[in-house]
Each structure stands twice: as C-alpha cells, then as structure tokens.
Amino acid sequence: MSLAFAPTGAAQVTAAVTERVRDRLRAEQIDPARVAEVAADIALAEVRRHNDFALARGLVTVDDEGACVRDVLAAVSGYGPLQPYFDDPTVEEIWLNAPDRIFIARQGRTERVPLALTDTAVRDLVERMLQATGRRVDLSQPFVDASLPDGSRLHVVIPDITRRHWTVNIRRFLPMFRDLDRLVAAGSLTPRAADMLRGAMAAGRSVLVSGATHTGKTTLLGALIAACPPEHRIVTVEETFELAVEAEDIVGLQGRQPSLEGTGEVTLRRLVKEALRMRPDRLIVGEVRDAEALDLLLALNTGVPGAASIHANSAQEALTKLAALPLLAGRNIDPGFVLPAVAASVHLVVHCERESTGRRRIAEISAPTGRVVDGAVQTQPLYRAGDG
C-alpha cells in the first residue's frame, strides 16, 4: 500500500492514518465494532508504518502512538470527536446546535465544548449512529429517535425543519443512578422516601412519575423497576429504548416508525395491548403523552400494576393530565369514566424537579385517595422535599 502523502501537522497525520485504516478494514471485511482488538492492531501497525516512512523522509512523526491509535479507533468505530464525551461517565447529555456549537451537560449544568466539526462530519456521525438501529433520517422523514448500543437516546432533526444545520441530541442514562440507594446517596431523595417507594413496588402499587423535561423522570423510573421483587415479570413499553434496566425476567418493547410507503408503524397503543398478552406482573410505559393513556388506564383497571412517566408541573397536574389524555383516543370516551378510573388505579405520584444549581430531586410524593372532588382527583401528601 502506497504512502504517497506528506501531511504537515498532527491532525493531518491522524486523518491520513485513519483513511488507511478504513481502507484496510474495508478490504479485509472487518467490523471494528465487533473485533476491536483486530482493529486496534491494524491502527497501531499503520501508525508505526507512518513513523517509519516519516523518519526516512524527514516528515512529521507521531510522538504519542497510543493517543493516535485511540483517535483513529474513535474515528473508524466510535463517534469520532464526540467519543471522549461518550467515554466520560459524568456527561449526561450531548447536543449539537450547529457543527461549531456543541454542548454537554454535567450534573444538570450546561457547558460549551471547544470543538468544531463540519456539516459533512455531523452527517457522517449521525449515519454511523443510526447504522445499527435500523432507523433513518432524510427529507421524507426529517426527525428520528433511536437507541444507541450503549443505551443513549439519539434525536435528530434536519433542514428544512431546522433553519440550516442538523440538530442532534444524545441523552445518556448513567449507570451510577440506576437504583434507589444511589439516588439517596446523590441527595435526590431521603432514605425514608426511598423505603416508601421500594415498599410500593414490592406491594404491586401503580406509580406515576411526573416532572418537567430533564428532571430525572426516566432515571427514577429505571430505579423503581430495579426495586421490583426479582420474581416479578416486567414488560416495558417505549417509543425508543431508554430504560436500560437489568432484571431476571424483563421484556422490552419498542415502537416502530412507518416505512417510506407509510406502512409498518407500531404505536405505543398497540404495544400496551401486546404487553398484556405477555403475562406481566408489572407493566411499564416509558412516557405517556397521547392516547396510549387510555390503554394504560384500562390495563391498570384489570389489576395489572403499572408505572409510567408523564410531563407535568406538579403531582396534581400529572393526575389531571393522565385523566385528559385518554380523551384523545376518540369521541366515545366518557370523562365520567376516566376520572374515577385514574383515582382508583394510581396509588402514588412522584414528582421530580431540577433546581437552579442543576441538582435533581424528588420534590413530592402524593397518594390519590380514590375520590373525585370538584372534578379533580383528591390526593394526600406523603412526602415533600425539605420537610420529610
């Protein structure tokens, strides 16, 4: 293989070596994601080959072979310049407003990172992320949600829905907060509140987790699943896999977008109905936002314990919203049925919030009394942050 190039800087050397590694992987039909050790050996061989060539001709050499190999592997099998942020266990979210406006979140606080890509590089990264998901983004379908292999959630919007650049959000779900004890250690709730939630899950109570965006609803829902007794069979229903929970007997179901012909779509409503045929001891709906609320409510009324998250500004508003969403299912839904059903089926509402410092916490836990008073589900407070 020819080395007919004369790179003049470290970045150019890395780019040139990366291209040769890609050529070898392609020629030898090697998937670097599956055989990482082989890809690493090839990358190291190409770095050393470059150094031999450069030393003989007085060109730029690679001083830190290990760092160059890591950069090359990130480019061919990882997520290129973004890979260090995927490897950082403190990074909660990564988003790109434009190729040169890239941000991350740590502990709820936003940071802009000193990184500038190109439009082509961003498109290549998105294509690499979507490669293993079976999902696509194009002019006919300018939005995409997908679950990455590490459990992160990818959301992409492209022009002309956005003004000019591809917009990318990657929500990561950190393993350090996947059970109630770790949330207690992080100061998100008290030990007594954790015991209350643990007891509710063990007793088969139905729990609704509410809060605004990025307040930790999915994290808490995953911790509640982890608190279920090991003998429980759990079925989760999500638009995109986010609940990265390990359990002895768990099945995860994910919705599907329609094809180019408009066929093949699998909605949350369909998944909830299918989940009930799978003998669940507990049904989990990742997020309730549409008419699937009716199917969840009907499931809870048949005696299947459930848990779900919902966007709301308080525990009381969460119940009001859960009672309103079933009406989207059709004109024949009677509000006179929905409100009492919500009051009887939901046992606890756990509301999450994010403080100005970025810290997430459980703000309140309320319990419906089973009564409807003046057109609203009556509740009693069990816990408020700050007063126990």
Image (cartoon, rainbow, N blue to C red):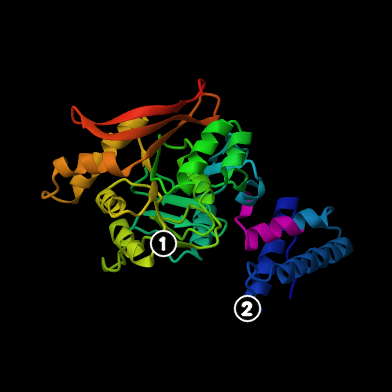
- Whether residue 379 is visible to the viewer of this picture, yes or no, is yes
- Structural distance between the alpha carbons of marks 1 and 2: 32 Å
Q: Residue at x 18, y 27 (%)?
A: 374
Q: Position of residue 155 (x, y in %)?
A: 44, 50
**Residue 10 is one of the magenta-drawn residues:** no
x 40%, y 61%: residue: 280
Q: Nearer the viewer, residue 134 or 326?
A: 326
Please name the residue shown 57% across and 45% down the image.
Answer: 179
Q: Amino acid at mark 1?
A: Leu
**Quadrant of the image occupied by residue 12:** bottom right
**Which is more toward the observer, 15 or 372?**
372
Q: Quadrant of the N terminus?
A: bottom right
Q: Amino acid at mark 2?
A: Gln
Q: Earlier in the sequence, mark 1 or mark 2?
A: 2
Residue under label 2: 29
Overall secondary structure of the magenta section:
helix
Q: Which residue is mark 1?
A: 253
Q: Secondary structure at mark 1?
A: strand
Secondary element at image label 2: loop
Magenta includes 75?
A: yes
Which region shows up in magenta? 69-81
